[in-house]
Amino acid sequence: MYHDNFDRSRQDKIEQISDFVKRTGKQIKLRVCWESPGGSNCCECEKCSITMIALMLENLDPKKFGFYFNDDIYKYSKKCLLEGKWDFIHDDIDLWKDIKKHVSDSDEREFFKWLKSYDLNKSIGKYNTFYNKIRRKTLATYKKIKA
Ligand SMILES: [Zn+2]
């Protein structure tokens, strides 16, 4: 188990982890989530998503680091960035910017090409639009009914 405050870390740290894993063949479980109770990663919040994308940028499989996600992480992250699903508290936008900075020019993956050209500042502020406030309220109510 690898506990860390990922708020203050950077893609460089992921690169270090990547080196370590490739060198030693050891598995590391990352625990980054604040949303999920019980010590697992929810794989939906901004923290989980950023970490998964950061791992994938290094060609690492998030599943080997304690993340379980069935859908397309690229698609999901892009949608959340474009639609303002995340509020970017805890300076998460800086982590996205850091990932963006580390995307190499020769990276042919669609998501990273898109990210490289996307102005992340556009995602800030969307969270508090009227539409997103309503959507969150509806979701919260729905969860309550289900529970
Ligand atoms: Zn999470």
Image: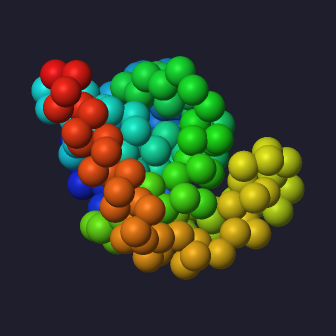
Q: Position of residue 10 (x, y in %)?
A: 44, 62
* Residue in front for this viewpoint, 51 or 135: 135
Res 23 seen here: yes
For image coordinates 72% across by 53% down, the residue present is 112
Q: Quadrant of the N terminus?
A: top left
Image quadrant occupied by the C terminus: top left
Would residue 77 be found to the left or right of residue 107 on screen?
left
> Percent from the top left, x then y, of residue 134?
35, 57
In the rendered image, the vertical position of residue 59 relative to residue 126, given as above or below: above
Q: How is the image coloured?
A: rainbow
On screen, 16 above or below 114? above
Nearest the viewer among 10 and 38 is: 38
Residue 56 in which image quadrant: top right
Q: Residue at x 22, y 39 (%)?
A: 141
Direction from residue 106 to residue 117 in the image, left or right: left
- Residue under the point 31% across and 45% down: 138
